[in-house]
Amino acid sequence: MTRPQGRLASRPRHSSTYAAAVGLAAGVLLTSVVVPYVRSEPTASATVSSSGPEGVPTAGSGTGVTGNSGNGAGPASGAGQGPSAGPGNAVSSSVTETSGPGTATIPSGPVTGVTSSEIKVGIGLIDVGAAKQFGFNFDIGNEKARYQALIDRLNRQGGIAGRKIVPYFESFPATDPTTASQADCLTWTKDDKVFAVLVESQLPTAAEVCIIGQGATPLITTQGTEQAYYANGLLWTTQASDNRILDDEADYLAGNGSLKGKTIGVLSGDGTDEQAVDNALIPRLSSLGYKVKDVEVVPSDAGGVQRQPIAISNFKAAGVNFVIVASNVVLAGPFVEAANRAGFNPTYALSDFNNEINDQVANYYPPSFQGTVGLSTHRFPEYRDGAPFTSTDQACLNVIHPVDSKVLPPTNAAFEEAMGNCAVFDVLVDGLRGAGAALTQASFLSALSGLSRFGIPATQDGSFSATQHDAVDYEQPVSWQKSCECWKLVHGLHTPIRKMS
């Protein structure tokens, strides 16, 4: 199996068809509007426990801001109310979670970020302005106004057991988020001392570990990451982990016969992307009787474009005719285009790994990509085919559309980002409600682990448990269509919904 080493030193040469799209001079670390942050930097040195909060009592299921009982924001299903997990008011007992290479200890004493009247919450805002110089003209609307509208509605209705949510907003640039997001982490955890952090997107690995590791603060995001980062129980995502996505994709491809007689290659990102490929995809394919002939690692920075011709050449030399893409979505289009120019047109398979099923960059695929099938948990293809909004999505829109009209129509970047804002806020509210009046970090995590099937804005339903902190559980097969340069359901609104394996 080929394992490329190092990166080329020369600067990349871009073809006119995708030079603006990639804009790699400043990197391709774009937001989940186009792609969740690609975890290209080395794993941070902070220790994160390998065990989650096993054995904690569970709380009733609910739907947070979209509930019609309690302090919800819309007409969806009712919100649950879980038990309190500790005596006293806003005081935690010491909780230590072990059984792995690290330990996360929740200290006793006053609960960080919680008073008798307030709950401090850190909220990350994405600045996409700099991305426009690289040709990305998407508009994600007014993210701060949307969060504030959700918070104001909840607070007007009494907050959480009488406590008001107090937001601490920090922003970071889409094109180079690592330094800024790490600084935001320190502001939230050391200066503001927030109870939890919400981010619509995937933070760089170092910032993620700063929050859940050194910062010992719960982090709720939309995009999943490599399974190891969920280990100490403080990371919760509405999307599936990288490992679960890749395991599921392998099962799907093997189950429908797509891999029979194929010589399989994997186009992998570096960093945690490569970890997930090594820890999940390759072992699962092997267990199903399929061998990966070649893995090509394409860095998620300027080296990515430089690496592409070598990867293409290696795939061709290995006789690969089926490529599973597990890399940066912004690089996927240019890779397919470069491969097409080189006369290399294998069958491709994509998934929600790194948000690959994404219309914001779908126009960069060449005609040879026609009919490529992927798996997606997103509801955007349903809305393109005329499906009505789910009650969860409508509840979100009822609150945010009055303050940000850009969130409609549902095929634009602002809608996708806005639904993610509601998704992470919903999870926060669910956990806070379930924790009860005697809010502690332990009771909050316990309540999250007890959330059974619940609606996720613009996404199929999901669930949490003591062992699953990556929510989404359902998906549909989609295919890329040249006619619209977009992803559509393979059988329209009759496409079956499948349970992720």
Image (cartoon, rainbow, N blue to C red):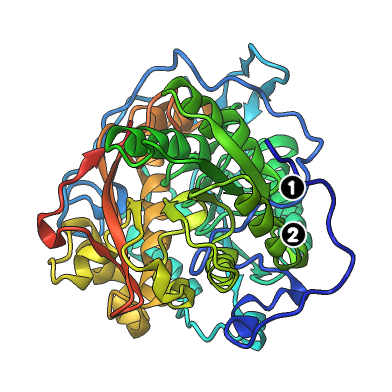
Look at 76% across and 48% down and name the residue there. Answer: 190
Look at 55% across and 44% down and name the residue there. Answer: 265
Would you say residue 162 is visible in this rendering?
no
Looking at the picture, how far across and down is residue 402, in whole percent? 30, 80
Circle on res. 206: 1
From this view, report whether residue 400 is shown above or below residue 300.
below
Looking at the picture, how far across and down is residue 464, in whole percent? 37, 32
Q: Amino acid at mark 1?
A: Ala
From this view, report whether residue 3 is shown above or below residue 360.
above
Q: Amino acid at mark 2?
A: Thr
Q: Which residue is mark 2?
A: 178
Looking at the picture, how far across and down is residue 349, in whole percent? 42, 51
Look at 50% across and 24% down and name the residue there. Answer: 286
Are dots 1 and 2 in contact, CB under 8 Å? yes
Query: Which type of secondary structure does the marked residue at label 1 adopt?
Result: helix
Q: Quadrant of residue 433?
A: top left
Circle on res. 470: none
Image quadrant where one finds the C terminus = top left
Question: Could you tell whether 33 is left or right of 23 in the image?
Answer: left
Q: Quadrant of residue 111?
A: top right
From this view, report whether residue 465 is shown above or below residue 26.
above
Question: Could you tell whether 301 is left or right of 290 in the image?
Answer: right
Query: Which type of secondary structure does the marked residue at label 2 adopt?
Result: helix
Camera-side residue: 456 or 217?
A: 456
Q: Are there few (<14), some (14-19), or many (20+) residues within 10 Å of tag 2?
A: many
From mark 1 to mark 2, how far is it between C-alphas? Answer: 7 Å
Camera-side residue: 383 or 212?
A: 383
Camera-side residue: 334 or 159?
A: 334
Would you say residue 242 is visible in this rendering?
yes
